[in-house]
Image (spheres, rainbow, N blue to C red):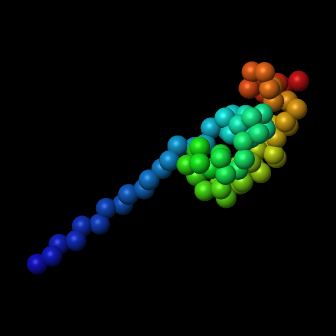
Amino acid sequence: MVTVKECAAQWFRPEIDLDELAKLRWCEKWTQERLADHFQRPRATIIRRLKELEGSAYGNRQAYSRSNGIFNSE
């Protein structure tokens, strides 16, 4: 007799750090491929997250301070 037990399992990865993503892409000029390797995500995920950022305050590249890597709200 074979007994089968089903267990629900779900695997979650930590979210991509959006501050780091913005800094690496727009200040450090990393490529999408390099970002994908760094964050261990598919390139399509990186592209999607960058598009999301461009539609938010993060997308204001001039507001992102190159010197300290933080956003300037002014």
Q: Number of numbered discs present?
A: 0
Q: Position of residue 11 (x, y in %)?
A: 44, 53
**Residue at x 62%, y 50% (from the top left corner):** 36
Residue under the image location 66 percent in, 35 percent down:
20
Residue 14 coordinates in the image, percent (x, y): 52, 43
Q: Residue furthest top?
A: 68
Q: In the rendered view, would you say 37 is above or below 66?
A: below
Please tell me which residue lies in front, 29 or 19. Answer: 29
**45 sits to left or right of 22:** left
List x then y, in percent, for residue 45. 65, 55
| Residue 53 visible, this orientation | yes
Q: Is residue 61 above or below residue 13?
A: above
| In the image: residue 2, left or right of residue 49 | left
Side of 6 relative to 55 (left or right): left
User: Hey, which quadrant is residue 22 in on the image?
Assistant: top right
Please tell me which residue is depicted at 74% across the width and 26% down the height of the picture: 69
Residue situated furthest bottom in the rendering: 1
In the rendered image, which quarter is residue 58 located in? top right
Camera-side residue: 42 or 10?
42
Q: Quadrant of the C terminus?
A: top right
Q: Image check: 60 left or right of 34? A: right
Q: Judge whether residue 46 can be spotted in this image.
A: no
Q: Quadrant of the N terminus?
A: bottom left
Residue 23: give x, y in percent of width and height: 73, 34
Residue at left offset 75%, top offset 25%? 70
